[in-house]
Image: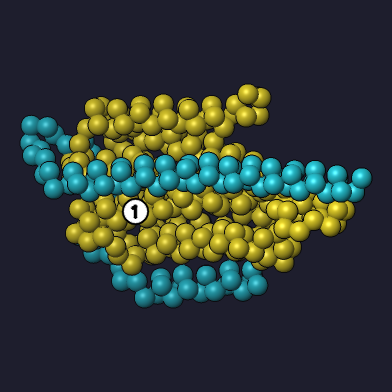
Amino acid sequence: MSASHRLPVALLGLSAALFFLTLYWTFFRAPLEAEMGIVQKIFYLHVPAAISMQLLFVACGIASLVVLVKGSQRADAFAVAAAEVGVALALCVLISGPLWARKAWGHYWEWEPRLTLTLVLTLLFMAYTALRGFGGADPLTTRIAAGIAIAGIPAIYLVRVAVEWWGGTHPQVVWKGGLENLDMRIAFGLGIATFVTLAGGLVILRTRIERARQDLESLALDAAARYDLEDSA
Amino acid sequence: MIRAFCLALVFAASVAAAQAPAPTADEAPSTTFRAADPSKFKEDLDGVPFMVGAYAAIWAVLFGYVVLLVRRSKSLEGEVAALRADLAKAQQSAR
């Protein structure tokens, strides 16, 4: 296995090890939360997934900017990968959050600013991935999709500040330094490390697939032009 | 188009801010997670299915995504093999 292939495998392996360590710390070391009880343990995966999702959407927006300015195929492949892995993490957030809310608030969903904006953000990047999936390598589609990803950057900032600006019932613990217990902080830190390494490994793998698809597409076009092939790829 | 979208987003956010009622003391978001006192806290087990459901859902989504990536990678390998076969045929007939 080459060094470049070892990196994503190492990251995914590290993520798996960290995941089990997070589970251990969450269930055997971190204490129960005084108000919410056991359901608060969703926090140790829900918030790290949300933070990783936001990082990936920002990365997708920045890579899309590079695509628009320089037309880089490498940046385009990275943007596609970051958006897709981000959407997978967004699904984790949007499923685990309502399950927590059902116990904590008494209902699965509330149209409060942070939840609504997170849903809008997810739909925005789902639109991006759908456009890239069905639009192929058409340059106009690529540019429109890049525009959508760039437009997502202010939405990510709005998700971050939504509760401070507009209120709402979503807990504001992380940015307020509200984890009072050391084991809670360690479990949360392990959760962050798990999801960041997982996201890194998945993005590298997905970027490779996208790069291979780009190469195959250009090779197929080249071969079709040279040998008059039909439906090669 | 991007500028129009950003403006629309800011406008929608401003409208939402203007319409949002101020949270009451009961509705105010929690800003701290405190450890429960084990001698006083009696765990309500109603939360267990939600917690297990959330962990299972996260695991299922991520596992499903990894399976999807592997299938895509295999399908791409198939396309490369098909292209190679087509190229070999075309080169033979060109000779």
Tell me if residue A130 comes above or below residue B80 in the rendering. below
Q: Nearer the viewer, residue A128 or A150?
A: A128
Q: Quadrant of the C terminus of chain B?
A: top right
- The residue furthest right is B95
Q: Residue at x 50, y 50 (%)?
A: A86
Q: Name above or below for residue A219 compared with residue A15.
A: below
Q: Quadrant of residue A22?
A: top left
Q: Residues within 10 Å of mark 1 (few under 14, many from 20)?
A: some
| Residue B95 can be seen, yes or no | yes
Question: How far from the left and from the top, in percent, is residue A189?
Answer: 40, 33
* Residue A41 picture location, percent across and down: 27, 40
Question: Which one is in front, A87 or B28?
Answer: A87
Q: Does dot 1 land on a helix, a strand or a loop?
A: helix
* Front-most of residues A24 and A142: A142
Callout 1 amino acid: Ile
For disc 1, the chain is A
Q: Is residue B33 visible?
A: no
Left or right of B41, for residue A136: right
**Left or right: residue A109 compared with residue B76:** left
Residue at x 36% of width, y 42% of height: B59
Residue placed at 24% from the left, 27% from the top? A28
**Colour seen for chain A:** yellow
- Residue at 73% across / 53% down in the picture? A232
In the rendered image, residue B62, in percent from the top left (x then y), is placed at: 42, 43
Q: Provide residue A173's location: percent of width, then percent of height.
A: 34, 46
Coloured how? Answer: by chain
Q: Which residue is mark 1?
A: A95
Q: Quadrant of residue A188?
A: top left
Above-or-below relation of A181 to A100: above
**What is the display colour for chain B?**
cyan
| Residue A3 in the figure: left or right of residue A71 | left
Q: Image quadrant for the N terminus of chain B?
A: bottom right
